[in-house]
Amino acid sequence: MEWISQYGLFLAKIATFVIAIAAIALVIISAAQRKSGKRGELTLTDLSEQYREMQEEITFERLSPAEQKIWSKEQKKKDKAEAKQAKLAAKKGEKSPEKSCLYVLEFKGSVDAHEVEALREEITAVLAIAKPNDEVLLKLESPGGMVHGYGLAASQLDRLRKKGIRLTAAVDKVAASGGYMMACVADHIVAAPFAVIGSIGVVAQIPNFHRLLKKNDIDVELHTAGEFKRTLTLFGENTDQGREKFREELNETHQLFKDFVREQRPSLDIDRLATGEHWFGTQAKEKGLIDDIGTSDDLVIEQIKDRDVIGVRYAQHKRLIDRLTGSVAESADRLLLRWWQRGQKPLV
């Protein structure tokens, strides 16, 4: 059995060596990121060009070998002629006519809506270069979450409207509660037939372990200054007065939510629709919660004909620990979404 212990010791040494190398590499990468001073990176993608390349590739693959040779020659000849014409125009000082632009943003929201930090940067970038005829398409997916996070996200979208940039929200899967709070800011809302829309309501649930602690002779002391600094607690004994105040705060938040939606879409019968219920896309259109049925893909392809379509994405640099905790948080969000889709409600 001695060889087993020696082999185990050998493996332990190898593991220690690998961990040490990884730690050194991590320190070097972190130092380089701090030195660069960049919090993130903005990426622009020409979706129009991607779509044209895809069309050409499919067209090419459907031709016979002989036709492919002819097509390739004609394409090269065409590209050469266009490049020559552009060069001549540049020498004469002529500018090619500018197309209006559609900027495509994506927001896949978590419970705490931390994605709003990237959304803020993307909107700031668009506002810095957008012209009067340009538009923004937001591909939105969120079941809702914390009130303050989604309130800020909606305020970021409102920056576009205040600058006169038309905003379209496209919902392929879900924009409920806080997600709908964002969607209703848009000038136009499009949703897939079975996308989940609505849930204009507020919910909160807090477990209480007071009886369990009391049973095991464990005391928890909570000291506050201010009558309602704490209404409901996890470990202390909750009172009827605290519960009533908590419900009052929920109702106030719900009223603010209703007022916000009413302001954005005044044609809605908000008192009839703000029951916390959700509807599928076709039902939501009948009730006036959205304007059209369709998918984000259809909107992009339709706009490619007449506009330059640019994808805008801001990616934040993350430390290794943030990446690990972020993966755990994303898994929790996906689990919450599955629960919600089975009948549970989001926070707001």
Image (cartoon, rainbow, N blue to C red):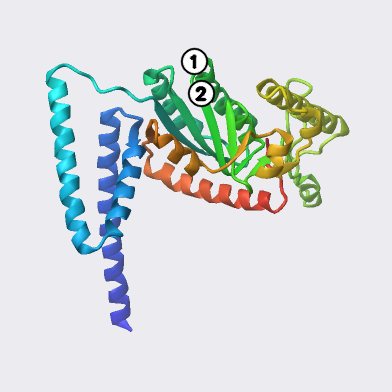
The residue drawn where x is 26% and y is 64% is 14
Looking at the rendered structure, the secondary structure element under dot 1 is: loop
Mark 1 crowdedness (10 Å alpha carbons): few <14, some 14-19, many ≥20: few
Nearer to me, 331 or 3: 331
Q: Quadrant of residue 201?
A: top right
The residue drawn where x is 36% and y is 20% is 129
Taking the image as shown, residue 251 lies to the left or right of residue 82, namely right
Residue 163: give its label. Answer: 1
Taking the image as shown, residue 194 lies to the left or right of residue 72, namely right
Measured as percent of width and height from the top left, residue 248 is found at 81, 27
Quadrant where the C terminus is found in the figure: top right
Residue 166: give its label. Answer: 2
Question: With respect to residue 3, does 120 lie above or below?
Answer: above
Question: With respect to residue 286, does 94 lie above or below?
Answer: above
Cα–Cα span, label 2 and label 1: 9 Å
Q: Residue furthest right?
A: 240
The residue drawn where x is 35% and y is 44% is 51
Taking the image as shown, residue 283 lies to the left or right of residue 90, namely right
Measured as percent of width and height from the top left, residue 218 is found at 75, 46
Looking at the rendered structure, the secondary structure element under dot 2 is: strand
Q: Quadrant of residue 147?
A: top right
- The amino acid at mark 1 is Lys
| Residue 202 visible in the displayed image | no
Measured as percent of width and height from the top left, residue 280 is found at 68, 45
